Structure formats: structure tokens, C-alpha cells
Image (tube, rainbow, N blue to C red):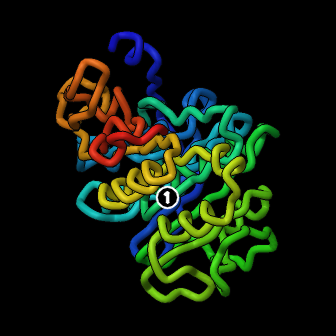
């Protein structure tokens, strides 16, 4: 615990950009060079929203530029805190504590990472894709889902993804520019998106792989709890390793209040773990052990 706290940094960060999208979504970019230098995919920051609210809010990091010294967050207005944050303008200063939490850890023995993000669970998947694309050992695929308009203009992808249904051909422009294939899913009937869940598309892709390539897959997921349970079921069914990033309400975000505890399965049996410092990334089999009973992943 002490070691984790010693690794945290506190910066007064200038708002460099703050863009608004449909569905009360915002992308916030702040200058925080010391935190940017240490952030990893899956870690998050605890941010002050405005002078009227002393309590910080946890936001997953979506993009980092260590050279430029900035962090970027995608968030949705869901309460007083994020509503206040949405009023911050370029030039304002917010206090940022981070990077916090256990990040994703990809295994070189699994060179085909499958990244599944839903809603505000999209940001860690973008960050992870950015990390993986710089390592020639990995060939990631990103599948994103949203029930509000995506916070970007879906792009007709030039990057082929085997096993996709006819007409499912849109992706995220940023990932396309990076050379990382992506596909989109929604129940809202958006053009070029799969009408269904991200796990539906993941299943189609997995079924299109031969046994040898399927054994190269590791699944990473972030999103609402029901989605993560479906991701865990999918991983267990195909006997694949899987890491999930949990979303929980947090007060202190540094492990002191224990308000974000969840039950996970450890080698010693069930135990209560704090999402902020013991996670937010956990092995799926630890969070959803019922689906992995007898599975060899």
C-alpha cells in the first residue's frame, strides 16, 4: 500500500482541449507531464471537477503523450461531478492525482490481443491499443460498443477483419490511422455497426480462427458489469486468458476508504479487494470464477 501511494503524483493540470459529443460525452485533454510519463493502459486518474466540489472523480486514461506531456480522458456526464467538469474551459486548471491502479499486462505468448470496450469502457482499450501497436510482437483487434453515438465519426475501415458479418465495416478513425483494425457494435442501428453486442462480434472472429491462431488470443475488456460478465463467459468458453477492468464508485481512490471493494477469488479463497489499488484490472477468472469452473484458460 505504501509503495503504491509513493508512486502517485499530484499535478495542477491546464486544460488544453475539451470537446463535446452527442450523448453528453466529452473528451478532456490536460497537461500533466509527470503523470503522462508514468501512465499505463488500464490506469486512471482522480480529478477535481471544479471549485464547488471538493470530491474528486476517477477517470480512465484514454490517451497519453509522454513527449507532449498530456493526458486525455473520455467521460460521460452522469452526475453533479462530471456536470461540473464539463464546464471547464481551455486554460482552466484541474488537480490531477495519478496514475492509479494496476494496469493491463499483455503476454508475449499471446500475440493476438482481443480488446473489447463498451461505453465509457472504451478509453482503456484505446490506450492499450496504442501501447500494443508499438510492439511488433502483437496484432491487436479492437471491438467497441455503445448505445449512444460514438464520440468520433465512425469510419469505413480499410483494414480487413476476418469473420465479420456483411456490412459491419466501420471502425474508429484514430485506430485506423494507427493501423489497428477495429469494428463497432450497437443496438441503435448505426450504419456500418453490428446490431448486437461486442461479444457477438468477438465470437464471430474467434470462430473464424483455426485452433493454432485461437491459442494466440488473450482477451481484455472494460465496460459495465453485465458486459464484463459476458466477456468472462466468452473467454471461459474458448478457454482463453482474460483480463477485465472494473468500474466502481470511488471516494479516495488510493485504498484508504475501502469503498470500492469487490469479492475476488484468490489462491487462498475468496477475498475482498479494492478496485482502486488492487485493480482496476483483474483476471476475469478471479472476478467471475463461476464461468471458469473446469476451464483450462
Give the residue drawn at x 63%, y 42%.
64
Give the residue drawn at x 42%, y 30%.
101
Q: In this view, which residue lies farthest toward the top?
A: 2
Q: Which residue is mark 1?
A: 117
Quarter of the image holding residue 133? Answer: top right
Across and down, in percent, residue 100 comes to: 43, 31
Please determine whether, in this image, residue 59 is positioned above or below residue 223.
above
What is the crowding at mark 1: few (fewer than 14 residues within 10 Å), some, or many (at least 20)? many
In the image, 33 versus 252, the foreground residue is: 252
In the image, 110 versus 103, the foreground residue is: 110
Q: What secondary structure is found at the residue carrying circle 1?
A: strand
Horizontally, is 112 left or right of 286 in the view? right
Horizontally, is 77 left or right of 90 in the view? left
Across and down, in percent, residue 11 comes to: 48, 30
In the image, 13 versus 209, the foreground residue is: 209
Give the residue drawn at x 20%, y 28%.
270
**Residue 91 visible somewhere in the drawing:** no
Across and down, in percent, residue 82 comes to: 33, 58
Report how many numbered discs are placed on residues in the image. 1
Please determine whether, in this image, residue 21 is positioned above or below residue 293.
below
Amino acid at each position: 500500500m505504501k509503495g503504491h501511494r509513493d508512486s502517485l503524483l499530484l499535478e495542477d493540470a491546464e486544460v488544453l482541449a475539451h470537446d463535446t459529443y452527442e450523448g453528453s460525452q466529452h473528451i478532456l485533454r490536460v497537461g500533466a507531464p509527470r503523470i503522462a510519463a508514468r501512465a499505463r493502459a488500464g490506469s486512471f486518474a482522480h480529478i477535481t471537477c471544479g471549485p464547488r466540489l471538493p470530491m474528486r472523480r476517477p477517470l480512465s486514461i484514454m490517451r497519453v503523450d509522454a513527449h507532449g506531456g498530456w493526458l486525455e480522458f473520455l467521460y460521460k456526464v452522469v452526475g453533479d461531478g462530471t456536470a461540473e467538469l464539463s464546464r471547464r474551459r481551455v486554460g482552466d486548471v484541474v488537480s490531477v492525482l495519478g496514475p492509479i491502479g494496476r494496469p493491463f499486462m499483455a503476454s508475449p505468448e499471446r500475440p493476438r490481443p482481443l480488446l473489447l470496450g463498451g461505453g465509457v469502457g472504451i478509453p482503456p482499450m484505446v490506450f492499450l491499443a496504442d501501447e500494443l501497436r508499438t510492439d511488433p510482437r502483437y496484432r491487436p483487434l479492437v471491438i467497441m460498443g455503445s448505445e449512444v453515438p460514438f464520440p468520433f465519426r465512425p469510419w469505413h475501415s480499410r483494414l480487413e477483419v476476418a469473420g465479420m458479418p456483411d456490412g459491419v465495416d466501420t471502425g474508429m478513425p484514430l485506430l485506423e490511422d494507427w493501423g489497428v483494425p477495429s469494428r463497432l457494435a450497437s443496438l441503435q442501428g448505426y450504419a456500418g455497426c453490428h446490431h448486437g453486442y461486442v461479444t457477438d462480434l468477438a465470437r464471430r472472429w474467434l470462430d473464424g480462427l483455426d485452433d493454432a491462431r485461437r491459442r494466440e488470443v488473450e482477451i481484455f475488456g472494460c465496460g459495465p458489469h453485465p458486459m464484463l460478465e459476458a466477456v468472462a463467459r466468452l473467454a471461459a468458453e474458448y478457454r482463453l486468458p482474460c483480463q477485465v477492468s472494473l468500474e466502481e464508485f470511488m471516494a479516495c481512490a488510493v485504498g484508504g476508504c475501502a469503498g470500492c471493494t469487490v469479492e475476488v477469488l484468490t489462491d487462498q479463497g475468496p477475498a475482498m479487494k479494492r478496485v482502486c489499488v488492487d485493480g482496476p484490472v483483474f483476471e476475469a477468472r478471479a472476478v467471475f470464477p463461476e464461468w471458469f469452473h473446469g476451464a483450462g484458460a
